[in-house]
Amino acid sequence: MPEGGQLSIEARHEPAPADLVGIKLGDYVCISVSDNGCGMDEVTLKRAAEPFYTTKGDGKGTGLGLSMVYGLASQSGGALRLLSTVGRGTSVELWLPVAAIRADNPGAVAAASDRASRRCHVLVVDDDPLISANTAAMLEDAGHTAAEASSGSDALEILRHGAFDLVVTDQAMSNMSGIELARKIRKTWPSLPVILASGYADLPASEELRLPRLAKPYDQPELIH
């Protein structure tokens, strides 16, 4: 909304709409974010959730935000719906199925306790706050704890003041790449595992390429595995 406007965040509980393809019948929670900004044309709307597609300039976006949300919705049994009209605004709807098991169910509590017994403390490093927050949320949903760093220097400072079991770092970051961060981590914390996340097929040739790789965009099963 370059000229300003109104942003609305809403949640509602209702059955899945008939025109929402790819999800099962049943009760859902719909979380929607709507604006009355410039909107998207049909071409942009069709490609908006594609990995690495962005209309922003260099250095202002990765094009992974909506694709990560789409992946989160899909792996949760839900869906992402985008509605937009040029000159009228955009609405992003995240449809998530209502859980069939209550949180206070004894079996659910036992499962949560079992996951907690294998909990890891993970540092997530990414200069895109949406990707960082989504990765941390997927880790925490799997029973782990996560902290976030927006750069390599921030990550090193956090590591100096806390104990971690794993670092998951983006490769393409300004000032310090993921490989450079991994090199510094190995000098100071040689036993700390590092996973390198990247959306690029080719990385600089170096000994650090022996690091485990996580291809972007990734979903929760890929991250946890």
Image (cartoon, rainbow, N blue to C red):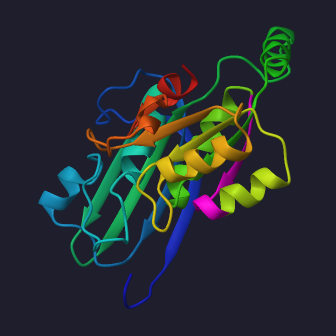
Could you tell me residue 168's position as x and y percent?
A: 58, 40
The magenta span reads 144-153
At horizontal 56% and vertical 63% (from top left) the residue drawn is 9
Judge whether 87 appears above or below 163 on screen: below
User: Which quadrant would residue 167 be assigned to in this image?
Assistant: top right
Instruction: Give the residue at the far left of this rendering.
Output: 43
Viewer-proximal residue among 93 and 54:
54
Judge whether 3 appears above or below 115 on screen: below
Q: Is residue 222 magenta?
A: no
Judge whether residue 78 can be spotted in this image. Answer: no
Q: Does 167 sit left or right of 112 as displayed? A: left
Judge whether 131 appears above or below 24 on screen: below
Query: Could you tell me how many numbered marks the image carries?
Result: 0
User: Which quadrant would residue 53 be assigned to in this image?
Assistant: bottom left
Viewer-proximal residue among 161 and 199:
161
Q: Does 209 sit left or right of 100 as displayed? A: left
At horizontal 46% and vertical 38% (from top left) the residue drawn is 208
At horizontal 39% and vertical 40% (from top left) the residue drawn is 70
User: Which quadrant would residue 91 be assigned to in this image?
Assistant: bottom left
Judge whether residue 27 can be spotted in this image. Answer: yes
